[in-house]
Image (cartoon, rainbow, N blue to C red):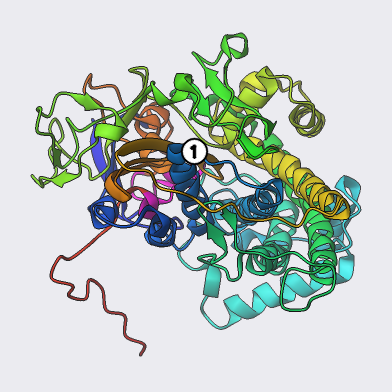
Amino acid sequence: MSKRITIDPITRVEGHLRVDVEVDGGRVKKAWASGQMWRGVENILIGRDPRDAWAITQRICGVCTTVHAIVSVRAVENALQLEIPVNAQYIRNMIILAHAVHDHIVHFYHLSALDWVDVVSALKADPDKAAELAQSLSNWNGNSKAEFRKVQERLKGFVGTGQLGIFTNGYWGHPAMKLTPEVNLLAVAHYLQALDIQRYASKIVAVLGAKSPHIQNVAVGGVANPLALDAQSVLTLERLMAIREWMLKLDDFVKNVYLIDVAAIGAFYADWTKYGRGITDYLSAPDIPLDGKGTQFAMPGGHIADGKLDSHKPIQSFGDPYFTAGVSEAIKHSWYDYKAGNDVSLHPHKGETTPNYTDFQDDGKYSWLKSPTFYGKPMQVGPLARVLNSLAAGHEPTKKYATAALELVSSIAGAPVGVDALHSTIGRHAARAVDCAVQVDELLRQWDLLIANMDKGDFTTFNKPVFPKGEQMGVGFHEAPRGVLSHWIVIDSGKIANYQCVVPTTWNAAPRNENDQPGAYEACLVDNPVADPEKPLEVLRTVHSFDPCLACAVHVVDEERRPVVTVKAV
C-alpha cells in the first residue's frame, strides 16, 4: 500500500524547500520538489544601473553571497566585452575558493553529517579506541585520546541537561544508522573542530572582500582593493602573509580530516552507492580564470551525457556559444506565466518572472522554481558534475584526490570501489570532499600568482567600464559550491532591461519541465529506501547530498514594503 510523505520544510538547509514522496513497499516511487517562496529579485533590478546589480543580487542569500556578486559583475563585463586586470582575477579567485572551502566544510559536518552519524551512540564509545582509529587514518593533531575524552564528556553534558543542544531533533537510533560508537565519536569530535576551522575561510573572504558575508570590494571592471607593499590602508604584503597562514590551516584540515572522514564514512555506507543516481547528465562551468578575458582557466568545465566520461564536451571561455545557446527555462509546473504560453521554454535573455500561484497541484503547477534544461535535457549540477567533468578533461589535481579517496574507501570497505560509485547519494559527498581538496590547493596557487605579479611591479586592480548606447547582452557564469550559476543581463542605454538568475538549486530542485521530465532531486529520490515513513531519514540523506540553498532559487518580496518576517527574542 502506497503512502504519501510530505517534508516541509526540509531542515538543515537554507529553507523554503518542500519534498513530497510516494512510498510503496519501503521504496520511493515518485517525488515532487517544491520551492515555497516567490522569486522577485530579477524584477527589482529592472531599470537600475548595471554597476549596482552585484550589490543587490548577492543579497539573494546569506550563505551564497560572494557567488552572486562575482557572477553579476562577470555578466556586465561580458556584455561590455570588458577585460579586467589579472590581479583582480587573482583576488576574486581567492575569495571564490575560500568561500567554496568554507561551504564544503560546513555542508558536510554541520548540515548533512548528522544524516549518517548517530550522536547519541557516541556516548557508548571507548574514546581511546576512537582516537586510535582516527590516528590510524591521519596525523591530524586533533585526534589525541585526551581530545576524544573531552568531546565525549562535553556530549554527556548536553545529554545530562535533558537536551542535546545543537544535536536536538536528530533521528538517533534510526535503523539506517550503522556506524560504530567509536566512528560516531570520531565524527562528533571533527564536527566540533570544524566549527573552529571554518572561520579561517571566512576571515580570508572578509580581508579580501572587505566583509563577510556580502563582500564589498568587487566592481564592474575588477576589484576595489588597492595593492601596496607597505601602505597600511590597502591590501598589503603583511595582510597577504596572514591570509596565507589561514590557507595552510584549511589545507591541513581538508587533507587530514575532511577527505579522510568522508572516505571512511562512505566505506561504512557503501550500500548507499546504489541509491540517488537519478540524472546522469552533468553540467559544470570552467572557473578560476587566469587571464583578463576569461579564456584560460585553472579548473575545466563542460557537459557529460548519460554518465559517460568519454562524452565530455568542454565549455572553454566566458560567453562560450555552446553554453549560452543551450540554456532554457520552462514553467509548465512552476507558479509563473509566460506571455507566449506556459508550455514553452525561454532562453534566459528573454526570460520572464511573472508570478501565477495556483496552490500545489500534483500534475499541474507546484513550485516557485523554474525548470532549466541544457539543449532540452534536465541536468545535475554541483561538485559531482564538477569532478566528473574534470576527470573527463584530464585535470590532474582532481585525478590525484579522486584516486586517493576511492583507494581509501576500497581499503576500508574491503572491496574495490570505482568512479561509477560516485553516481550516488554518498558519491556526491565524496565528490565534494575531492573538490574541496583541489580548491584548497588552488587557493594557495592563486596567492602565489598574485604575489609573483606584484613582484613584477603590476599593482593594477581595476579597468573603468564604458556603457555604449543601444542594447548589449551578456552572461556571467561561475562554478559555485553547489554547481553552475549564471546571471543573464540585457542592458539598454546603460540601464538593465532584463535580468535572470539561473542558479544551482534551480537546476537540481526543479519541478518537471515542459516535457514532464523530473529535476535532479525528484529523479534521484526514486527507489530510495524508506525504513520508517514517520522518520524519513533516507529521503533527507539524498536531498541533503546536493546541499540545497533555496534562497538562491526563490525569494520573497512585498511591493508595499511591509515586513515579511518578524523575529522576536524571548
550 within the magenta span:
yes
Compared to 537, does 271 lie above or below? Answer: above
Name the kind of residue labelled 1 in the image.
Phe
Is residue 416 visible in the rendered image? The answer is yes
Residue 370 located left or right of residue 226: left
Estimate the x, y position of residue 26 in percent, counting from the top left: 37, 32
Compared to 476, does 416 lie above or below? Answer: above
Compared to 435, does 149 lie above or below? Answer: below
Is residue 543 visible in the rendered image? The answer is no
Q: Nearer the viewer, residue 179 or 65?
A: 65
The residue shown at (22%, 71%) is 564
Residue 400 located left or right of residue 563: right
* Outermost residue toward the front in this view: 469
Label 1 environment density (alpha carbons within 10 Å; few <14, some 14–19, many ≥20):
many
Which residue has dot 1 on it? 477
Residue 482 located left or right of residue 153: left
198 within the magenta span:
no
Q: Nearer the viewer, residue 158 or 485?
A: 485
The residue shown at (78%, 32%) is 397
Q: Which residues are magenta?
A: 533-552
Estimate the x, y position of residue 334 in percent, counting from the top left: 19, 38
Quadrant of the image containing the C terminus: bottom left
Estimate the x, y position of residue 213 in percent, counting from the top left: 53, 67
The residue shown at (71%, 20%) is 418
Residue 553 located left or right of residue 388: left
Element on which disc 1 rests:
strand
The residue shown at (76%, 50%) is 254
Estimate the x, y position of residue 48 in percent, counting from the top left: 29, 57
Q: Nearer the viewer, residue 554 or 132?
A: 554
Quadrant of the image containing the N terminus: top left
Q: Nearer the viewer, residue 140 or 164?
A: 140
